[in-house]
Amino acid sequence: MKQNFHTKNRYPADLPMTPLVPIQLSADGPVIWCKLEFLNPSGSTKDRIAHYILGNAFDHGHLKPGSTVIEASSGSTSIAMALVCAQLGLRFIAVLPEGVSNERVLMIRAYGGDIHFTPKEGGIIGCIRESERLAAEMGAFLPRQFSNPENIEAHELGTAREIVEQIPGHLVNAVVSGVGTGGTLVGLMRGCSSGRHVQRAFLARPVDLGAKREQECCSFSCRIPGVMECVSALFRESDYLDLTTIEVSDQDVIETTRELIRLGFPVGPSSGLNYRAALIAAQSVWPAKIVTVFPDRMERYFSTDLFRPFSGCETAQPQSGDRPVRCRS
């Protein structure tokens, strides 16, 4: 995966290996092997696809200093793209749906990225369409995280290869992951076994059983950013007949994320989803070696429901899908 970025202010082309650690929440509970992807430079696993896709485009002459990159994203991919573009001397424009947390907006702008908001009701699909329109108008490069096979390759050749190297015995029995683009789950399924499929694979799906499905994020719960369905061309659940889907209530996801944070893992909600689903998966495969990923860091969620108990705010009873907040002075 070596790449030759021609800029003097870049990080090494090869990202440093992130730790793989065994986590056991209770003395009699299962051990889950967790890949700490929040320790990547921008704070998420999306650094892998940003470095891989933009690095390949740079090496093959599709990008040069001063080129413009445009990507549709709900946040973490845009942060990673903004960081890599800053290293490579590229202009970056993030196309985001209205309503993303302000922390993500600030990070993108801090790396020099520009932001183009699209109407909330259009969701990520609206962002994709707008990014394509802008790219055609400006002659910009589109990474296309939702359809570019290099997304999967970045995880197959990077994340999964590291896991196999790090885990005792170099054998993975099961992988668990939520799906946004599908690149992580498919990359792990392919890369964690010489047969291109691990023994068991589990799809973690967050659900809010008390609210209707929202178009904004195209998923069953909008409290878990970055985990969505019906968007990616890289992953179709029906293509993987041996894949087991585990549904986790979004409240359990939030509570698990807070528990991980209290244990010293500064993670976001998708990590809580993955870990909770892995605990459920362990009921059928334990003591097999189960691997999951902690995708991103907590600081991009300070203004969200995840941190309300720590901010002096209380979430009132939701009405019509809203989650009003009462704050104590």
Image: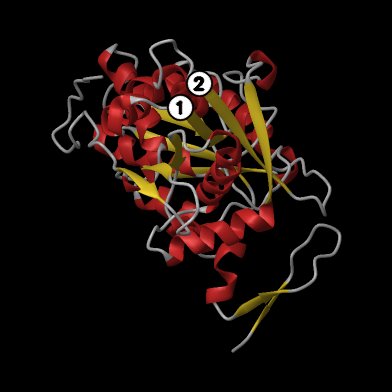
Asked if the residue under mark 2 is in contact with the one under mark 1, i.e. CB atoms within 8 Å, the reply is yes
Q: Is residue 1 above or below residue 231?
A: above
The front one of 153 and 128 is 153
Mark 1 falls on what kind of element? loop
In the rendering, at what x and y percent does residue 59 appear?
Answer: 26, 15
Residue 219, can we see it?
A: yes
Which tag, 1 or 2, sits closer to the chain's start? Answer: 1
For image coordinates 42% across by 53% down, the residue present is 297
For image coordinates 67% across by 53% down, the residue present is 250
Measure the C-alpha gap from mark 1 to mark 2.
5 Å
Mark 2 crowd level (few <14, some 14–19, many ≥20, 10 Å Cα): some
The residue singled out by tag 1 in the image is 173
For image coordinates 80% across by 70% down, the residue present is 317
Mark 2 falls on what kind of element? loop
Q: Please give the label number shown on residue 199.
A: 2
In the rendering, at what x and y percent does residue 44 appear?
Answer: 40, 43
How many discs mark residues in the rendered view? 2
Q: Is residue 239 above or below residue 127?
A: above
